[in-house]
Image: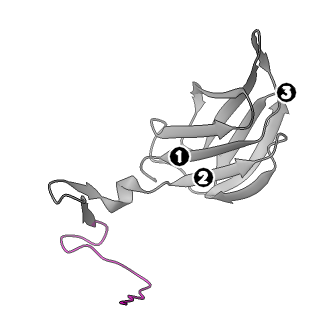
Amino acid sequence: MSEIKVDNLNGKTSAGDITVTSEGGAATQSLQQGLAKAWVNATSSAVLQDSNNIASGTDNGTGDYTFALTNNMNNSTYGITTSTQYASLITFDAGERGAASFNLRSFTRADSLTASDNESGTAIHGSLA
């Protein structure tokens, strides 16, 4: 068994440029771009249960949540991946997605989409500022 312990990795070309080769060896990907830059698991009241790079959650009303980032994103065009419990739907409004925070809305899928408080999990991918 081999083990490597390090506190810092630097790319060969530049300090922040670390490339990972695919399993088949045919493709490469930037390690930094593939990492989630923030993630959160929050209660139905936007209380942070566990997170990384999330400063706080705000409950704006039934099914309407805003999460502030500890470290800003480079712009507002980052990717948001969400999940929720039960038969619910989580959406985000691009107009309420900024470099410093993002807004999620939660709905229950029944006969119609009704705003509803639900626990959620979210990951952010993109470039940090």
- Residue at point 77%, 53% (across, down): 48
Between 53 and 105, the one nearer to me in the picture: 105
Seen from this angle, which residue lies furthest front?
1
Which x, y percent locates residue 126? 43, 46
Q: Quickly name the residue at label 1.
A: 124
User: Where, by quadrant of the figure, is residue 21 drawn?
Assistant: bottom left
Residue 32 falls left or right of residue 95: left
Of the residues under marks 2 and 1, which one precedes in the sequence?
A: 2
Secondary element at tag 1: strand
Quadrant for residue 11, please give it. bottom left
Instruction: Residue at 67%, 58% (x, y): give it.
Output: 51
**59, above or below 27, in the image:** above
Residue most extreme to the left? 26
The residue to which callout 2 is attached is 39
**Residue 63: % across, % down:** 79, 28
Question: Quadrant location of the N terminus?
Answer: bottom left
Q: Is residue 2 magenta?
A: yes
Distance from Cα at disc 2 to Cα at disc 3? 22 Å
Which range of residues does the magenta coloring cover? Answer: 1-18
Say which label, 2 or 3, has the lower sequence index: 2
The relative height of residue 129 versus residue 45 in the rendered view (above or below) is below
Q: Are marks 2 and 1 in contact (CB under 8 Å)?
A: yes
Q: Secondary structure at mark 2?
A: strand
* Residue that label 3 marks: 62
State the predominant SS element of the stretch in magenta: loop
Distance from label 2 to label 1 (Cα)? Answer: 6 Å
